[in-house]
Amino acid sequence: MKNLRTFEIDIVALKSGLHSFTFHLDNSFFAYFKEHQNGFIEKGNCNAEVILEKNEHLIRATFSINGTVELVCDRSLDEFDYEVEVEEIILYKYSEEERELTEEIILITRRTPNINVGEFLYEFLMLDIPMKKLHPRFWEEDEYLDEYLDDDSNDDSNEYSDQYTENNELDYLEDEDFEQETDSKSDEDADQKTKKINFIYSSDSSKEEDNKTDSSSEEEKIDPRWNILKNLKNNQN
């Protein structure tokens, strides 16, 4: 394959509605991208269908790809066939200029004669290939290893969680003991203050009683004849 003209679709002649196009992706297709875009998929056998839904505002393209591609195992370097199943959507929106707006939206003008879906087909296949390419004989072993690592990670998390909970409980108990000790100390201080107040009050009361007692004692010490003389003097006046 020298170019991607095989994957061009004439959109000017399309009427509004649904239109289906099929493509076969063989070794020549993958060899082209290996040579021109340094792709790592060298061989494959896939069938692709592109369904265009056209209206006055845009063209909705649905890509479906099924088949196998040949990969090289990262562990053993053995070649193996990897099954692919892809479903993606691209929107071609009518605008005043032609440019890629986002990864899923392409701007085209009403004068755009055709669209080429070849690069999208290869790109979608590349995205469907796993980062770690393993031969099927290693899948069960790799799955077991992943589960083991997940379980070990969960155990570490649970152990950390238990330790965290235990530390929180200890902190709570220490705080509770401290509060109880503080409350007990506060009660003792309150009792001491009450005793001091009672003591002061008792002291003041004792002083008043002592004053009354002293006054009575002084009255008792005065000679009663002075009272008689005061009364006589008052009568004379």
Image (spheres, helix red, strand yellow):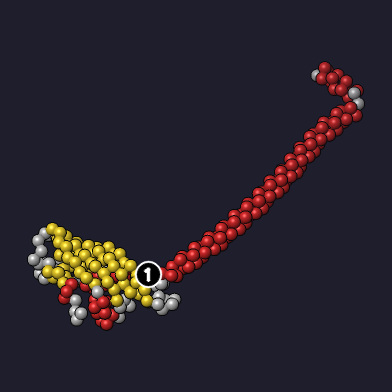
Q: Nearer the viewer, residue 168 or 20?
A: 20
Q: Residue at x 37, y 69 (%)?
A: 130
81 relative to 204 in the view: left or right: left
Percent of width and height locating residue 152: 54, 63
- Residue 58 is at least partly visible in this image: no
Determine whether, in the image, residue 181 is placed left or right of residue 69.
right
Figure check: 206 above or below 85: above
Is residue 113 toward the left or the right of residue 71 in the image? left
Residue occupying image coordinates x 56% and y 58%: 158
Q: Seen from this angle, which residue lies furthest left?
A: 13
> x, y (%) of residue 23?
20, 69
Residue at x 46% of width, y 68% of height: 142
Badge 1 is on which residue?
130
Q: Quadrant of the N terminus?
A: bottom left
Give x and y (percent) for residue 225. Answer: 91, 23
Q: Nearer the viewer, residue 213 or 109?
A: 109
Q: Residue at x 10, y 69 (%)?
A: 111
